[in-house]
Image (spheres, helix red, strand yellow):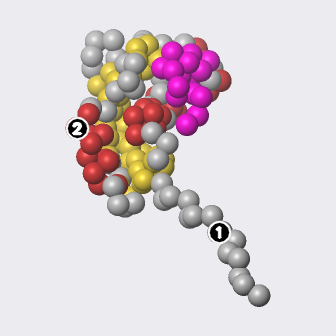
Amino acid sequence: MSRLFRSPAVFRTVMNLWPPFWGTGISIAEMAPDYSRLVVRMKRRFYNANAFGTHFGGSLYAMCDPFYVLMLVPRLGPDYLVWDKAASIDFIKPGRGTVTAVFDWDAAEIEEIRARTAGGEKYEPQRVVEIRDERGELVARVRKTIYVRRRRPDPAPATLQMVPD
């Protein structure tokens, strides 16, 4: 497993310094030590606002893009392939000030994923995260479809067999 996931503190620091997030003012504000819950915030600044002075839609989506997958990887472990498969965003109202999104995976959801992929089948859980402003009003809703499959074991290495002359 990647070194990024070995420590939640390292994960949080790296993600907060990652240029696409740092450059748009996106940051992880809170994170559970077991990767079960994560809170992402973005303050509106001149460099992440659109022509109307509200949050740029691309930045609103970017603050939600990787987190369900990145939280799932350490929770499932190295025996699983996890990818984003599809996403959509519904813009509800203009975002002003600081906006927040809360991501979570509870233990029952993790067990369901393990059960549905136990035989190597793919499973595509769908998640919805809401982006809210400082008053708690809904700014946007992001829908994500995630691809999960248990990795297939590597085939056994070929062995040399002695053949009698």
Magenta segment range?
Answer: 1-17
Is 108 on the left-hand or right-hand side of 117?
Answer: left
The disc at residue 158 is 1
Residue at the far left in the pictured view? 108
**Residue at 27% over, 42% down:** 111
Q: Secondary structure at mark 1?
A: loop
Mark 2, residue position:
108
Q: Does 12 appear in magenta?
A: yes
Amino acid identity at mark 2: Ala
Q: Using the image as rendered, state which of residue 15 and residue 99 is in the foreground.
A: 15
Q: Is residue 94 visible?
A: no
The location of residue 129, given as percent across then percent down, is 33, 33
Q: Nearer the viewer, residue 65 or 59?
A: 65
Quick check: 59 above or below 160?
A: above
Q: From the viewer's perspective, is the residue at label 2 or at label 1 nearer? A: 1
What is the x, y in percent for residue 130?
32, 29
User: Which residue sits at x=39%, y=34%?
Assistant: 75
Task: Give the distance between the C-alpha atoms of the residues marked 2 and 1, in whole angstroms.
Answer: 40 Å
> Which residue is located at x 37 percent, y 19 percent?
32
SS majority, magenta = helix
**Based on the displayed image, in which of its 4 quarters is residue 142 positioned?**
top left
Q: Quadrant of the C terminus?
A: bottom right
Residue 35 drawn above or below residue 133: below
Crowdedness near tag 2: few (<14), some (14–19) or many (≥20) residues, C-alpha within 10 Å? few
Describe the element under mark 2 as helix, strand or loop: helix
Q: Classify 10 Å Cα crowding around label 1: few (below 14), some (14-19), many (20 and above).
A: few
Q: Pointer 2 and pointer 1: residues touching (CB < 8 Å)?
A: no
The mark nearer the N terminus, 2 or 1, is 2
Q: Is residue 5 left or right of residue 107?
A: right
On whether residue 21 falls in the magenta region, the answer is no
Measured from the top left, where is residue 96 in percent x and y?
Answer: 41, 16
